[in-house]
Amino acid sequence: MRTVVIGSGSWGTALAQVLQDNHQEVLVYGVAEAEVNDINENHKNSKYFEDVELNPELKATTDIQCVKGADIVLLAVPTIAIDPICHQINDLLDKKTIIINVSKGFHPETNERMSEVIRRCIDEDKLSSVVSLIGPSHAEEVVIRLLTTIDAISLNNEDAVTVQNLFSNQYLRIYTGNDEIGSELGVAIKNVMAIASGILSGLGYQDNTRAALITRGLQEMIRYGVHFGGQQKTFMGLTGIGDLIVTCTSVHSRNFEAGYQIGKENSVENFFKNNTKTVEGVRTAKIVHRVAKENGIDMPICEEVYQILFNGKLPSDCAQDLMIRDLKKEF
Ligand SMILES: NC(=O)C1=CN([C@@H]2O[C@H](COP(=O)(O)OP(=O)(O)OC[C@H]3O[C@@H](n4cnc5c(N)ncnc54)[C@H](OP(=O)(O)O)[C@@H]3O)[C@@H](O)[C@H]2O)C=CC1
Ligand SMILES: O=C(CO)COP(=O)(O)O
């Protein structure tokens, strides 16, 4: 099986290295020449991983033609780039290909999940199926081979098992599943919760508050996911509580880090002025606000994050407002 990884950022590099470690045929395609040269010449991707020595066999290219003849294409670009990238590669694919999605979020205009975007953009005769390879996994840890478990989620079980076998090894364990809706909604919305968790930490709140955020945040994820056809049990798994924990508690999380700065400064101004990182939860907060309103889904934590990011509400006021809402039963 020949795999092309589109995106020479942090997750693309870490996942390509997994395949290289597994002695699979793999090539990274990147738009940034500096990243591609760094991988080929120095066996590093210093922009994302500083001094980490990559598998020296790993190779990268800036030539998109490399997609031709691929059995598997793994898309490791931000959600906003999935639609244009799919249109770009559609003309180059020459057989039924497994497309692996690892992005967490929604299409910025249509609200589609990533699998839906890919199925819309890739011709039916060129697509075997979409497999979402998602779960609690910071690239910074996978790239140094720390033990990690994630899911290969697909409507096509055979392709999910193919991906499971290709990527699994002694430091990465892949489970399969078929609840595409529940899984993709879980990993998208947890990014909003990670921003909330960072905000609360930046404001000075500690362990009790984070436990409350994770527990009540999970209820919001379930409410939203089940409304759109996801299975409740999925949210108890790697793409639900698993991914929620890892991003709400980790210094590696860019969503948490963004929230932390916003909470610390009690303002979004500097974040929006200076941020250059992929912080998917920001766009997701906007979409969840819109969709939840249209569908009458109660998402109080997501709504406060939206108000902070886009309506100028003070983070400290949001934390207090969540506490003084009408009292109710837990379940
Ligand atoms: N990093 C992680 O630990 C994890 C990330 N994810 C998800 O993976 C997705 C990708 O994130 P991640 O790798 O972290 O992001 P990064 O910011 O680390 O890297 C993104 C890469 O995509 C490139 N890129 C952007 N637009 C295009 C395009 N149109 N064509 C080709 N390349 C493009 C960027 O190039 P340039 O440098 O030139 O901007 C960069 O190399 C996100 O949805 C994220 O939520 C999921 C699990 C773990
Ligand atoms: O999705 C992730 C870990 O599972 C990565 O989180 P961040 O995008 O917040 O860094």
Image (cartoon, rainbow, N blue to C red):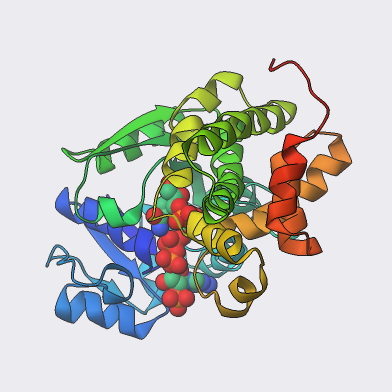
Residue 176 % position (x, y): 40, 29
Q: Position of residue 256 (x, y in %)?
A: 50, 54
Q: Position of residue 128 (x, y in %)?
A: 48, 43
**Picture coordinates of residue 144 (x, y %)?**
19, 54
Q: Is residue 299 left or right of residue 166?
A: right
Residue 100 appears in the picture as rendered:
no
Is 296 left or right of 97, judged from the image as shown?
right
Up the image or down, 68 lies above or below 213; here it is below
Please report the residue visible at 74 percent of the width from the left and 39 percent of the height from the top: 322
Q: Is residue 48 left or right of residue 132?
A: left
* Vertical relation: 120 (above or below) 136: below
**Image quadrant for the C terminus?**
top right
Q: Is residue 121 above or below residue 119?
A: below
Q: Which residue is found at the position 16% from the left and 73% from the top?
A: 43
Q: Could you say which is closer to the camera, residue 213 or residue 135?
A: 213
> What residue is shown at x 52% (from left), y 38% (from top)?
210
Residue in view at x 48 percent, y 44 percent: 248
Above or below 191: residue 176: above
